[in-house]
């Protein structure tokens, strides 16, 4: 299943029913392209095509609220590695950084784990902490709080209060959606205050987001574009989408093999 169809399935499952016109608008594809995608999903038994739209094969309440780390990691895996390699170039010995629980940030942590950089790393991700806990040149700080079992990461008031007292060079963070007017958005409302606290604690904020996250919508804004220093994406981000960001284009880095 390609990335767009996976996200279409995700939207239909979350909402139970979605109008055909709304899907075309949200994913910015033609009616013919969306019709093909829905036919494939219907033939695979993943949705029901109905007059004027599509519906989930299960009630929304039965759908997981958040994709697991594994489910997120299999989306655009090559792009995530490319983005992480580009992000790694921003690091220097002695930096203090925050890495959040996004799967692209996990790829960055894997690259750091194979390097000799001396870093202070703060994270709310169990996967990242376990990956880096024995690295001799990394001072690791884990943010405590409520544990979200699906994502294996912490959140909540304790995590936010702890983060507010920190001071770091760079935050590397993920987002569910990147939009030219709405900025950076997320579907998990409970994690947004922690992401905002991480931004306040950091001199620079770098968002890591593959091309499928662009011009999508999500439930709530994390931050507007003017609060972020760079957005690193992959070279599959189309020119028309890139140019739609207007004066914010210089903040968007399209990582490619020849730039690594």
Image (cartoon, rainbow, N blue to C red):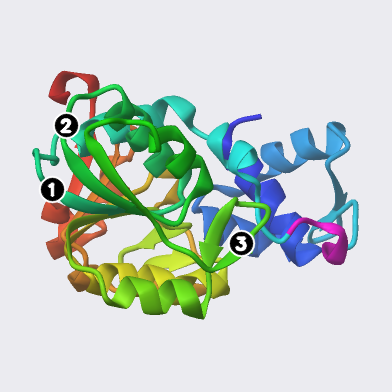
Label number found at residue 40: none
Cα–Cα span, label 3 and label 2: 29 Å
| Mark 3 or 2, nearer chain start | 2
Q: Give 50 or 219, whichever is nearer the viewer.
A: 219
Q: Secondary structure at mark 2?
A: loop
* Circle on res. 95: 1
Q: Are marks 1 and 2 in contact (CB under 8 Å)?
A: yes
User: Residue 147: which numbered mark, if any?
Assistant: 3
Q: Is residue 253 left or right of residue 135?
A: left
Residue plotted at (63% across, 60% down): 148
As helix, strand or loop, the secondary structure at mark 1 comes to loop
Question: Does the magenta-highlighted stretch encompass residue 85?
Answer: no
Upstream in sequence: badge 3 or badge 1? 1
Q: Is residue 92 left or right of residue 166?
A: left
Q: Report whether residue 68 is seen.
A: yes
Asked whether 132 or 28 is in front, the reply is: 132
Q: Secondary structure at mark 3?
A: strand
Q: Which residues are magenta?
A: 60-64
Alpha carbon separation for disc pair 1 and 2: 9 Å
Residue 61 belongs to the span the image colors magenta: yes
Residue at the image point whose x is 16% and y is 31% from the top? 117
Seen at 48% across and 57% down, the residue is 176
Percent x, y of residue 3:
56, 37
Q: Is residue 114 above or below residue 75?
A: above
Q: Estimate the x, y position of residue 184 in percent, counting from the top left.
A: 37, 65
Residue at the far top: name it: 258
The image quadrant where one finds the N terminus is top right
Quadrant that contains the C terminus: top left
Q: Which mark is residue 117?
A: 2
């Amino acid at each position: 299943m390609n990335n767009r169809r996976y996200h279409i399935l995700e939207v239909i499952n979350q909402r139970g029913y979605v109008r055909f016109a709304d899907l075309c608008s949200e994913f910015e594809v033609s009616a013919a392209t969306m019709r093909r995608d829905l036919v494939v999903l219907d033939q695979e038994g993943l949705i029901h095509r109905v007059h004027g739209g599509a519906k989930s094969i299960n009630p929304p309440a039965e759908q997981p609220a958040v994709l697991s780390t594994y489910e997120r990691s299999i989306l655009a895996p090559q792009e995530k590695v490319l983005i992480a390699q580009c992000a790694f170039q921003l690091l220097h010995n002695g930096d203090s950084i925050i890495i959040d629980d996004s799967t692209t940030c996990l790829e960055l942590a894997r690259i750091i784990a194979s390097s000799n950089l001396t870093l202070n790393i703060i994270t709310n991700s169990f996967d990242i902490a376990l990956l880096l806990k024995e690295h001799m040149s990394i001072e690791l700080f884990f943010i405590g709080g409520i544990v979200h079992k699906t994502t294996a990461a912490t959140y909540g008031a304790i995590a936010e209060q702890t983060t507010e007292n920190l001071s770091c060079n760079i935050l590397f963070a993920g987002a569910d959606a990147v939009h030219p007017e709405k900025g950076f958005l997320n579907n998990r409302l409970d994690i947004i205050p922690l992401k905002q606290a991480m931004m306040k604690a950091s001199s620079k904020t770098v968002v890591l987001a593959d091309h499928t996250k662009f011009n999508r919508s999500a439930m709530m804004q994390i931050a507007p574009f003017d609060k972020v220093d760079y957005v690193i994406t992959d070279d599959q981000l189309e020119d028309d989408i890139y140019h739609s960001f207007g004066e914010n284009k210089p903040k968007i880095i399209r990582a490619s093999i020849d730039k690594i």
